[in-house]
């Protein structure tokens, strides 16, 4: 039985399998509890979120070990994506006020200066705030660049619904300026290092990159729809660049997606599964360039990720192969467990929509778990192989839900994690994101499909283009008298100033002699050190110490007026 196998994967062998409730029954009761639990964590009137400002989502009411009584942009945006999907799919018209509160709260958070910066200097990627809407100023893994992408995705879903209602003035005048700030942030900063969603690793993250790509695609479509054409070209260009970069996370030989480029672990992490479910677009079919849930790459990745538990849990006393699970001594998270099931439910719905399953050499090992003699090819919905595969994969997916179900306490409350040998709920109680993950898995299990975001028909550019991030234009003027044949150069602490090289130092123009001048684009918001250099007859003379130093502006241009020292 799959469930037994998975239980042993999670170290739960001794538990009574027969008491496990079915996934259907579990979703039937737990989704109601999860919805109430989620709403209880939203200010101003949620039952467990007293002190939270209107529209603010607390991560958890837990105030000690860990203290999660903060609002994270990522968690809040994912929670509100659930709420906005329920509202826009017509499931719960009562949610509109909550959504408007959320929008107002997030628009205010955007303006709060914080340790990541101000609104114009990178502050939008601050991961978390106090629940009264003020900045959290303690040390933290910052910036986290998925927040603006996820927030804009949620608000774009709402904007598209409002446009369908004919409410274009609210979208254009009120929603769009807020969405645009986040999208512009993504378009400018996607190519810079970020802390991952588990707040541990500072590198490039598959989840962050995938959701940034999605945000710019649907942002471009929204901009087009409301006539904000000035943004469209930038978003499209950067979306193409991100899509190109996204491909580089795939490891063809090992058949999995590298979750984070840094971190020194195997790179197998549930962030890749979460990326797949949060960028699902049924209209894209099983497209692998966007790692759709039923794509051969995403399925192979799911197998490698799940197998990593099999090898690690039984032999290992604390360190797992996934960063999610090294946290709090390697116990399973509800939301990561539900995500595996959800990816597979999404896959099944997409196969139904496409009308077939395609088995490729990349996904063969995944499918052979369910049909050991299956070979590569396309299996129509009418075939016996299709029935066999979808039925076995559904059972496999349900098995993950049943594990979580078994370790859900009788009141239905969901903490962050459950203890890997006893199943006792662990870490933060009533984690809002845990509740959201039940609701999205339950919706997929019930056959609901969220709105398309434009993943279909994309082509990956032939070569990847970097984005240098925000730039400022700096004119360096230096007054320097020189002898005939002597020239002035500039070198400094950033690549744009040739990184202190004297050989490659930038030549200045003497057009306004004795003022020598050059204008250079350099990183914005950065402390830059530099010196001028004289070169004469093969000899090189640097300016005397100390180095010149200045902070570049957030954008725009600045002129420096120096005298040779
Ligand atoms: C448009 O939507 C906003 C947000 O819910 C609402 O406040 C406003 O009344 C709506 N306008 C119209 C004309 O329906
Ligand atoms: C920036 O983009 C280039 C081109 O895709 C890529 O090689 C590089 O790793 C990216 N760096 C970061 C930090 O995103
Ligand atoms: C994150 O990594 C980048 C690139 O290695 C580095 O420039 C930056 O200082 C790091 N940030 C933190 C907070 O460690
Ligand atoms: C700039 O200099 C640093 C320190 O010497 C070095 O690590 C880095 O690779 C250099 N970058 C370039 C583009 O030469
Ligand atoms: C100027 O910068 C260079 C390169 O970082 C450094 O080696 C040197 O010590 C600095 N000079 C002074 C006086 O700080
Ligand atoms: C340098 O001189 C220009 C022209 O006089 C002036 O506009 C600019 O503000 C000066 N820069 C600084 C940093 O004072």
Image: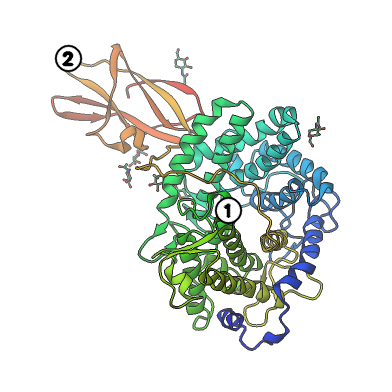
Q: Earlier in the sequence, mark 1 or mark 2?
A: 1
Taking the image as shown, residue 202 lies to the left or right of residue 282, namely left
Residue 406, placed above or below residue 280: below
Q: Mark on residue 524?
A: none
Question: Residue 242 at what x, y percent from top left?
Answer: 46, 44
Please tell me which residue is depicted at 78% across the width and 59% down the height of the picture: 35
The spot of residue 140 in percent (x, y) is: 59, 53
Quarter the C terminus occupies: top left
| Labels 1 and 2 touching (C-beta < 8 A) | no
Tag count: 2
Q: Position of residue 92 (x, y in %)?
A: 81, 51
Residue 93 in the image: above or below residue 333? above
User: Under tag 1, what secondary structure?
Assistant: loop
The quadrant in which residue 29 appears is bottom right
Q: Secondary structure at mark 2?
A: loop
Residue 121 screen position, x and y as percent: 56, 35
- Nearer to me, 309 or 106: 309
Q: Decide if residue 195 is in sight here.
A: yes
Q: Residue furthest left?
A: 537
Other residues around mark 2 within 10 Å, as few (<14) / some (14–19) / many (≥20): few
Nearer the camera: disc 1 or disc 2: 1
| Left or right: residue 171 compared with residue 221 | right
Residue at figure coordinates x 63%, y 44% from the top left: 153
| Residue labelled with disc 2 | 484
Residue visible at 40% across and 40% down?
Answer: 466
Q: Quadrant of the N terminus?
A: bottom right
Residue at which label 1 appears:
280
């Amino acid at each position: 039985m799959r469930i037994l196998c998975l239980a042993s994967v999670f170290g739960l062998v001794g538990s009574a399998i027969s008491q496990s409730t079915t996934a259907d029954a579990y979703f039937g009761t737990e989704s109601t509890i999860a919805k109430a639990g989620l709403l209880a964590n939203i200010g101003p009137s949620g039952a467990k979120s007293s002190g939270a400002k209107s529209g603010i989502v607390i991560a958890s009411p837990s105030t000690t070990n860990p203290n999660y009584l903060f609002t994270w942009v990522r968690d809040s945006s994912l929670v509100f994506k659930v709420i906005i999907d329920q509202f826009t799919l017509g499931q719960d018209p009562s949610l509109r006020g909550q959504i408007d509160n959320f929008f107002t709260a997030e628009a205010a958070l955007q303006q709060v200066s914080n340790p990541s910066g101000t609104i114009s200097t990178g502050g939008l990627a601050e991961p978390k705030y106090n629940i009264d809407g003020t900045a959290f100023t303690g040390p933290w893994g910052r910036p986290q660049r998925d927040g603006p992408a996820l927030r804009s995705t949620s608000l774009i879903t709402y904007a598209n619904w409002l446009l369908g209602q004919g409410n274009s003035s609210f979208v254009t005048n009120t929603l769009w300026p807020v969405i645009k700030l986040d999208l512009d942030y993504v378009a400018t900063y996607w190519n810079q290092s970020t802390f991952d969603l588990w707040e541990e690793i500072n590198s490039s993250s598959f989840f962050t990159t995938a959701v940034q790509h999605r945000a710019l695609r649907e942002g471009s479509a929204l901009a087009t729809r409301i006539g904000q054409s000035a943004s469209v070209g930038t978003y499209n260009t950067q979306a193409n660049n991100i899509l190109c970069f996204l491909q580089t996370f795939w490891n063809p030989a090992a058949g999995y997606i590298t979750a984070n480029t840094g971190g020194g672990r195997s790179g197998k992490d549930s962030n890749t599964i979460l990326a797949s479910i949060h960028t699902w677009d049924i209209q894209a079919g099983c497209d692998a360039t966007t790692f759709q849930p039923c794509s051969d790459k995403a399925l192979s990745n799911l197998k490698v990720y799940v197998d990593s538990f099999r090898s690690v849990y039984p032999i290992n006393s604390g360190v797992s192969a996934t960063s999610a699970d090294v946290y709090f001594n390697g116990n399973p998270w509800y939301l990561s467990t539900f995500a595996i099931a959800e990816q597979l439910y999404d896959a099944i719905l997409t196969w139904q929509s496409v009308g077939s399953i395609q088995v490729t050499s990349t996904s063969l090992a995944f499918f052979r778990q369910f049909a050991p003699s299956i070979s590569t090819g396309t299996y129509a919905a009418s075939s016996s192989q299709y029935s066999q595969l979808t039925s076995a994969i559904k059972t496999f997916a349900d098995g993950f839900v049943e594990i979580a179900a078994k370790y859900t306490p009788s009141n239905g409350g969901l903490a962050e994690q459950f203890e890997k040998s006893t199943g006792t709920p662990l870490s933060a109680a009533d984690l809002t994101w845990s509740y959201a993950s039940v609701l999205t898995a339950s919706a997929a299990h019930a056959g609901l499909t969220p709105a398309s975001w434009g993943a279909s028909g994309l082509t990956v550019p032939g070569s990847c283009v970097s984005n240098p991030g925000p730039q400022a234009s700096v004119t360096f003027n230096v007054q320097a008298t020189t002898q005939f044949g002597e020239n002035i150069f500039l070198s400094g602490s950033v690549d744009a100033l040739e990184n202190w090289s004297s050989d490659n130092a930038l030549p200045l123009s003497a057009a306004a002699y004795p003022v020598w001048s050059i204008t250079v684009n350099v990183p914005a918001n950065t402390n830059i050190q530099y010196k001028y250099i004289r070169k004469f007859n093969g000899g090189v003379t640097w300016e005397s110490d100390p180095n010149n130093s200045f902070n570049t502006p957030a954008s725009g241009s600045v002129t420096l007026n120096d005298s040779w020292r």
